[in-house]
Image (cartoon, grey):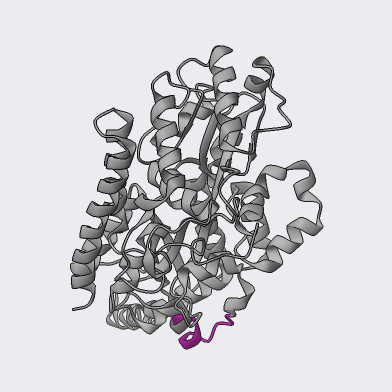
Amino acid sequence: MTFKTRILMSVAAFALAGASPALAQTEIQWWHALTGANNDVVVKLSEDFNASQKDYKVVPVYKGSYPDTLNAGIAAFRAGQAPHILQVFEVGTGTMMSAKGAIKPVHEMMKEAGEKFDPNAYLPAITGYYSTAKGEMLSMPFNSSSMVMWYNKDAFKKAGLDPEKPPKTWPETFEAAKKLKAAGYDKCGFSNAWAPWANIEQFGAWHNVPLSTKVNGMAGFDAVLNFNKSPAFLKHWTNLVELQKDKTYDYSGRTNNGEGRFTSGECPIFLTSSGFFGNVKANAKFDWGNAPMPYYADVQGAPQNSIIGGASLWVMGGKKPAEYKGVAKFFTFLSDVDRQVKLHTESGYLPITKAAYEKVKASGFYKDKPYLETPILELTNKTPTDNSKGLRYGSLVQIRDIWSEELEAALNGQKSPQAALDAAADRGNQMLRQFERTASR
C-alpha cells in the first residue's frame, strides 16, 4: 500500500467517523409490564414507530408485574439509570406525582418539543385521573381499561340461564353463580381478579360511596380512609364471606394471576379488566361475553360510573432535550386517531381520544362486538361525583396489599367482615400518614 493510498484511507475513515453521530439514532427506553397478547401490542407499536422515521428507536423492555415495574423504575432513577418512559399502573399515580424531579410532566415536554398537544382531545374520564387540578396532564394515557364482568355463555346455557341476559345486580349474580355451581362448576361460581380494585375501589365508585375524605385523595395527600363506615361495603364483604364457604364465590388472589380460571372454564363468571379481552379471545374455547359490574339496587344512585384501570406512560426526569423530542414524537404517534382505533379494536383497551371512540362507534363496530364498548359505557354512565372521579393515594401499591390481607382474613374466618374493614381502613391510614410526611418534605 502506497503512502498516498494510506493517507486517502485515513481521510475517508476520519470523514466517516465524523459523520456517524449524525447518522446515529437516539434510543428511547420504554419499560413496561404487559404480557401475552398485550406484550405483542407494545412490541408492534414500537416497531411501527421505528419504521416510520429514522431519528429515534424505541426499545420496549418488559420489567415484570405492574408493582415490579414501578419499583424497578424508582430504583433505576435513584441510580441515575432510569428509562425514558415508564409504564405505571393507575394506583401508582399518587406516588409518581409526589416524585418531583423524577418525572417530566407530559404537558411540559410536549410544549417544549413543539408537538401539537390538546388535552381536550382525550376522553375526560381518562385524562382526569392523570392530570392536576388545573387540567395539566402529567402522564400519557396508554392502556386504559375498566372492570367488567366476563361470563361463559356456554356455561349459562348448561345451567338454564339466558346467555343474552347476564345478571345486573349482585343478588342476581349470586343466584346465577349458585345455579352454575349446581350445573357442575363446583370449584367456582364466580370470582374476580385484582381483589382490592374489585371489592373496594371500583365497588365504591360504582355505588357512589366514598373511600375517604379529600375526594378520594384527589384533593390532597391528607385524605383519611373511611369506607369501613359504609353499610354498602359491610353488606358486600359479608356476602362474599358467606358465599366463599361453599365456593359459590371463590377468591382468586390479589392480582390478575387467577384470570386463567375464566379462560380454562373453571370460573364461569369473572370480574376483571376489560383489557383481558386479548387473552379471552385467544384462549377461551367457549362462547363468551361481558357485561357491566353488578350493583346493589338498594344503594341510592347505583350504578354511578366506573373508574379507569390500566396504566399510563410517565416520562422520567433528567434526560436530554433531543431524547425528550423523540419521546414527544412517539406520544404523538400513539395518539393518532387510526392507530387508536386499531389499538382499541384489537387489544380491548379503551380508545384514549374522543375522535377514535367516535370513529369506532360510527363504523357500527360495536353492534357485532358490544363487549368492547362495555367499559366505555360504564365510565360514562353518569357524570362523575367526588366519590367516582377516581382515587389518588400515595403508597397505594402497599395499601392494596393491606386491603387484600384484611379481605383474606375475613374470607378465612379469622376476622368478622366489620373487623376486617376497620383494620383495612386503619392500617391504610397509617400508610397514608407516613407517605404524607415523606411527600411534604
The image position of residue 307, as x and y in percent, is: 52, 57
The quarter in which the N terminus is drawn is bottom left
Is 110 one of the magenta-colored residues?
A: yes
The image position of residue 54, as x and y in percent, is: 52, 71
Please determine whether, in this image, residue 313 is positioned above or below residue 286. Answer: below
Magenta-tinted stretch: 109-117
Q: Nearer the viewer, residue 212 or 333?
A: 212
Picture quadrant of residue 432: bottom left
Is 298 one of the magenta-colored residues?
A: no
Q: Is residue 419 left or right of residue 370?
A: left
Query: Which residue does the image show at 59% across and 48% down from the upper left?
Result: 347
Q: Nearer the viewer, residue 287 or 110?
A: 287
Q: Nearer the viewer, residue 33 or 382?
A: 382
Picture quadrant of residue 235: top left
Q: Is residue 267 left or right of residue 22?
A: right
Please determine whether, in this image, residue 10 is positioned above or below residue 404. Answer: below
Whether residue 83 is visible here, answered yes or no, is no
The image position of residue 433, as x and y in percent, is: 21, 65
